[in-house]
Image (cartoon, rainbow, N blue to C red):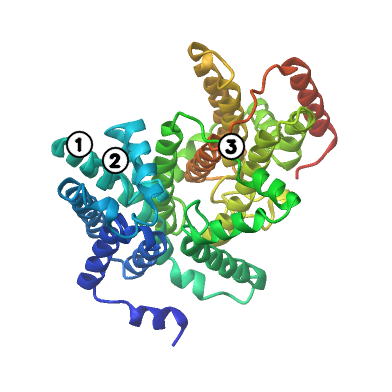
Amino acid sequence: MNLADWLYQLTPSPALLLLIILVIALVESLALVGIAVPGVVLITAAASLAGHQELSLWLVLPAACLGAVIGDGVSFILGYTQRERIPHLWPFDRHPEWLSRGARFFQRHGALSVLLARFVGPVRPIVPMIAGMLHMSPWAFTWANVASALLWAPAYILPGYLLGRNWEQLLEVSAGMPYWSMTLLTVIGLLGVTFSLLRHQLAREGRAYRMMARFARGKRWRRRVWLILSNHQPRSEFPLASLTLLILSLVALCLWTLMVLEAQGPLAMDLQIQSLFATFDWLTLLAIGQFLAKMGDAYGVLALILPWGIWLLRARHFVAFTHFAGALIGIAIANTLFKQFAARARPDVPDYLVGSMSYPSAHASTAVVLYGLAAAFIAQELPMKWRFWAYWVAIAICVPMALSRLIIGVHWASDIVGGALLGLMVCALVRISYHRFAPRPLIPAPWGWLTAASLVLLSARIALLPHA
């Protein structure tokens, strides 16, 4: 008996599994209890079991959604009816700052806070109770509660469900798969579990946080390091656009990847689009495709970003530099992992792509991250009425970059879609993280000189270097 069969035997019945998913979603949203429960880990594990059993998504998603609605509803009723007693109950009698933080969040965002809090870990179980304590309209709360649950359920269920559907492929490792890849998966899993269990301890009100703060007071150099590490000033405006983009792109990426893996080959759409592009047998078009292929590979990206990276460091814009560099490194790692486990063959494999898998398109995902983040950083320095131009320019660059992969025939169309969704998800994550800081404006900057330097380096890369 292999490991996959053994795990399958441990899986509860479909009805019991649906009940477990409902209860986990309820408890994670429940005031007081949800603070201490590692809900992300539990809901991912339960969704993975559902995916492995091939339990219908149309049953799993409503169960999670219903549990989340009930959990927030009970929290609201608790706050509505026990307003005077709650501050004197454990743990709020020992940590009154939890209530004050939730109240500030609610007062800042109003009715929208119920929807936003569903995705903000530290205030998720608190805000519905605060809404009840402040006597928010029950009808307004109900609409916000249901809407947030409808968004939350796919975002939290689909990644685990997708993992569960492909357990056997991940556990039945062929002899040719490198040992390090399984080790890397194990390490990532352990880090995820550890992070979820310790996230409350490392928050400002956590015991570990207070112990480190007391330790830092002992020596002057420790106080200085502590201030540097803990002095993150949040901005006043919540990054609603980035949060929405993250949720939508994550759900779409999971659904799209699940469809691609289920097909076990090119989709009907892929074959039709491939036939269409095969009719464009024009030398000029192929030359443009090869040009864009070099522009979007590792050497091309490095040539484009090198002058800007040097300027960011010289101008001491360390936060922007770290986030931009982290995004490019992160998308490279994500592309490698996705290709490894999707193991989808390319429609055509030139010499420089031998051994490389097809899904998702690394050129498409990297282009979205590179030009999408560049547009976001530029737009934040422009007047409101001009910001959309930065994003349109980014789109005008990314679309031809993605289509060039179809022109030269090294990707399926569904690879391009998966790559774009992956890139959008990384962009959203980086922008949400960047929002936590209060960096200096990126202007004034020598835009003209930096652009010229990037174009010169890119020209040299295309003329002198082979494909990366």
Mark closest to the chain's N terminus, 2 or 1: 2
The reply to whether the C-beta atoms of the residues labelled 2 and 1 are less than 8 Å apart is yes
- Residue topped by disc 2: 114
Number of marks in the image?
A: 3
- Residue topped by disc 3: 369
Mark whose residue sits in front, 2 or 1: 1
The reply to whether the C-beta atoms of the residues labelled 3 and 2 are less than 8 Å apart is no
Q: Residue 88 versus residue 250: which sits nearer the camera?
A: 88
- Residue topped by disc 1: 136
Residue 407 showing in the rendered view: no
Q: The residue tagged with tag 1: helix, strand or loop?
A: loop
Q: Indicate the position of residue 112 as horizontal and vertical percent values.
A: 30, 34
Q: The residue tagged with tag 2: helix, strand or loop?
A: helix
Q: Residue 181 versus residue 123: which sits nearer the camera?
A: 123
What is the number of the mark on residue 433? none
| Residue 178 image-quadrant placement | bottom right
